[in-house]
């Protein structure tokens, strides 16, 4: 098979550089662990130092076998079972991209770029002459460098599954390229299991269904946010997953639109932000993590390599419903990518240990992390806002709005449910505070239009003159087609139409979105049970579209409001108690999580969320500072207002 000499030379040079350069200093890596955002009760520690660590496989005695994109495969030994490596042994050093590893019936299988080999009894004796014992069970893999790092998985059918990436960015695959093949453990009965798979570097089988799930990375060079990366499910052999007819998800490459795809292309079961590079993952079946993690998939996002604003560099959690269908995706552990766009680690593969903890390989740092859970509290990463950028002394601050002149307004609920003790506080540009309006009930969302503040005040909408503080009720409870339950957020379009969300009760009863026209006419644009359980944060997304945060489900929706029939589209999920929405001058979207005290950043509404802030008691309705360079975050339970620079 003829090779491209340029590609071959580039890849050879790359691996030569890797072979001679040192990975991160282990003390620096340990120091950086404090930067990770880890759920309460979880801990991340360094398990082992393994240069270029990629796919991992667990032996019968607890040894962990680790492939690399170089010439070596390692064995990591924890003799005393204290969950820290005692020894790292190089067992092979003459491989051609020995990325894939798997254990089947006491044999170690290694997938190289061009072949699959197996080695007997490594758990028995790591000093055996493995090179001399090598059995080549299959030597017909496409020997091409582009996407030449293979991934292995042992199936519940006692078959060996192998991913074969396309040898290109986008092209017509030849033979078994761009597929997943499977074979018997001795290399016999080779068949193509799945077609149209551009570049999968992660497979696992769902407990209970035995369905093969695999990640797949979309085509490059189409843009920062297209096409999405994928999680796919193959319950049977013979399915086609779209490549090259689809660049990823539903996206088409402009140069390939004249190609007619098969009529029965299988769509992804979940999509992720473009270029996040979703690689290895595991379905969690252990008992150490809380019960809600049972059956979840934990995916390692390796991170973008050619995107101006980097994305990924985190572990993502995929949850499933009672029918074992994907329910939502959300970050599990992040922080390898800082809010300033600095990268210090690249998660690659995930492996479950017998005690229920997880190992995560990082080929950037040359380490393997161990993620464990003991339910104990631990220190959170440094607070995102310094004391100098924090104002205190508020009584349940819920919403905030800053004018271009530097004046900031804050709604204070007071005692929740108590009538008459709510107020709007005015903070002048010099920091001086005064009460603009008091005597309100439970004021929450607010917005400013033509010098007038509009406030959602429990069961009514109040307009307050920003100069005098004079109050006018523009929509009393009796004006609504149903009695308001929990009026929450306010959003005003360029014509002066006021939109207000009603989150309803805890079960979403009475929920809806209402429109108050400039002439005072009130109409309901979204009813309860229209697909959004408890609408909260509102944000205009064009002249006839609203983004809506669902406080009840943590989901983000788009609501078409310009046509006769309102339509609702799910865009994203995993935001806990989704509360505030705001977009900065660069088009980045921010979502606050009241229940979890987090703030998420998205490059666009469907992008994989990046958690940039955590540690608040209750991050309520966020806004931008007057100069647009910071987020204003009311922490309702703490009674504080934080100013956090954004990048």
Image (cartoon, rainbow, N blue to C red):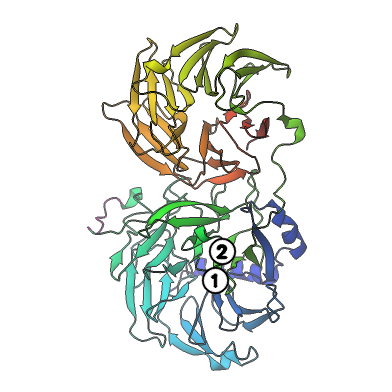
Q: CA distance from mark 2 to mark 1?
A: 7 Å
Q: Which image quarter: residue 154?
A: bottom left
Q: Which mark is residue 348?
A: 2
Q: Does residue 262 belong to the magenta stretch?
A: yes
Circle 1: is it few (<14), some (14-19), or many (20+) Cα within 10 Å?
A: many
Find out whether residue 170 is within the magenta segment. Answer: no
Find residue 188 and report its horizontal and vertical position in percent.
Answer: 36, 86
Q: Residue at x 42, y 51 (%)?
A: 228
User: Which residue appears at 46% of the width and 21% of the height?
Assistant: 459
Horizontal and vertical percent position of residue 211: 36, 68
The residue closer to the viewer here, 75 or 617, is 617
x and y percentages locating residue 596 in the rendered image = 58, 44
Magenta extent:
257-263
Judged left or right of residue 116, residue 174 is left
Toward the viewer: 449 or 304?
449
Drawn side of residue 89 relative to residue 153, left or right? right
Is residue 447 depicted above or below 342 in this figure? above
- Residue for badge 1: 55
- State which tag comes first along the sequence, 2 or 1: 1
For the C terminus, give its image quadrant: top right
Query: In the image, what residue occupies the spot 52% across and 55% down?
Result: 316
Give the residue furthest to the left. Answer: 263
Q: Residue at x 36, y 56 (%)?
A: 268
Query: Looking at the image, can residue 625 be seen?
Result: yes
* Dominant secondary structure of the residues highlighted in magenta in the image: loop
Residue 7 position within the rendered picture, expressed as x and y whole percent measured from the top left:
50, 66
Tell me the quadrant of the picture where the N terminus can be found.
bottom left
Image: 247 above or below 535 = below
């Amino acid at each position: 098979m003829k090779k491209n000499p340029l590609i071959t030379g580039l890849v050879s040079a790359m691996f030569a550089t890797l072979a001679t350069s040192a990975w991160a200093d282990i003390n620096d890596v340990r120091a950086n662990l404090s930067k990770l955002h880890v759920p309460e009760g979880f801990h991340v520690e360094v398990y082992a130092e393994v240069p270029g660590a990629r796919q991992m496989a667990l032996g019968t005695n607890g040894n962990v076998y680790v492939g690399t994109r170089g010439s070596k495969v390692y064995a990591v030994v924890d003799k005393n079972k204290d969950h820290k490596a005692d020894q790292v042994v190089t067992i092979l050093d003459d491989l051609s991209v020995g990325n894939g590893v798997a254990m089947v019936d006491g044999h170690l299988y290694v997938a190289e770029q061009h072949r699959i080999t197996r080695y007997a009894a490594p758990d028995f004796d790591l000093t055996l002459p493995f090179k001399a014992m090598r059995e080549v069970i299959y030597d017909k893999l496409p020997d091409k460098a582009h996407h030449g790092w293979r991934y292995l998985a042992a199936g519940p059918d006692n078959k060996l599954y192998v991913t074969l990436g396309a040898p290109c960015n986008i092209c017509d695959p030849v033979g078994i390229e761009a597929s997943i093949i499977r074979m018997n453990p001795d290399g016999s009965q080779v068949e193509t299991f799945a077609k149209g798979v551009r570049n999968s570097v992660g497979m696992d089988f769902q407990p209970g269904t035995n369905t093969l799930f695999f990640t797949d990375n979309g085509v490059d060079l189409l843009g920062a946010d297209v096409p999405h990366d994928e999680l796919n499910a193959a319950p049977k052999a013979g399915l086609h997953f779209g490549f090259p007819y689809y660049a990823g998800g539903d996206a088409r490459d402009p140069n390939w639109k004249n190609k007619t795809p098969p009529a029965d292309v299988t769509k992804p079961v979940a999509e992720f932000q473009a270029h996040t590079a979703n690689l290895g993952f595991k379905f969690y079946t252990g008992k150490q993590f809380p019960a809600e993690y049972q059956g979840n998939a934990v995916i390692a996002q390796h991170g973008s390599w050619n995107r101006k604003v980097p994305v990924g560099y985190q572990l993502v959690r995929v949850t499933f419903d009672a029918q074992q269908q994907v329910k939502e995706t959300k970050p599990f552990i992040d922080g390898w990518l800082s809010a300033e766009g600095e990268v210090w680690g690249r998660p690659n593969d995930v492996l479950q240990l017998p005690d229920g903890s997880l190992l995560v390989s990082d080929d950037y740092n040359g380490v393997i992390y161990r993620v464990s859970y003991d339910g104990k509290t631990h220190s959170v990463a440094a607070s995102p806002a310094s004391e100098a950028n924090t104002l205190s002394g508020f009584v349940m601050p819920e919403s905030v709005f800053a004018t271009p002149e530097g004046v900031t307004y804050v709604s204070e609920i007071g005692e929740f449910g108590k009538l008459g003790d709510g107020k709007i506080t005015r903070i002048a540009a010099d920091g001086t505070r005064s009460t603009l309006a008091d005597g309100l009930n439970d004021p929450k969302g607010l917005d400013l239009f033509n010098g007038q503040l509009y406030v959602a005040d429990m069961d009514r909408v109040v307009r307050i003159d920003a100069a005098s503080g004079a109050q006018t009720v523009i929509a009393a409870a009796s004006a609504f087609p149903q009695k308001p339950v929990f009026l929450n957020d306010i959003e005003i379009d360029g014509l002066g139409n006021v939109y207000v969300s009603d989150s309803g009760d805890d079960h979403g009863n009475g929920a809806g979105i209402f429109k108050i026209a400039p002439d005072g006419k009130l109409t309901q644009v979204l009813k309860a049970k229209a697909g959004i359980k408890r609408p909260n944060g509102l944000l205009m997304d064009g002249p006839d579209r609203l983004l809506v945060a669902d406080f009840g489900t943590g989901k983000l929706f788009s609501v078409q409001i310009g046509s006769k029939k309102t339509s609702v589209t799910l865009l994203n999920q995993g935001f806990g108690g989704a509360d505030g929405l705001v977009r900065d001058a660069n088009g980045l979207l921010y979502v606050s999580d009241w229940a979890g005290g987090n703030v998420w950043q998205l490059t666009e509404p469907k992008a994989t969320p990046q958690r940039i802030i955590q540690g608040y008691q209750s991050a309520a309705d966020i806004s931008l500072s007057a100069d647009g360079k910071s987020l204003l975050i009311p922490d309702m339970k703490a009674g504080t207002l934080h100013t956090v620079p954004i990048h």
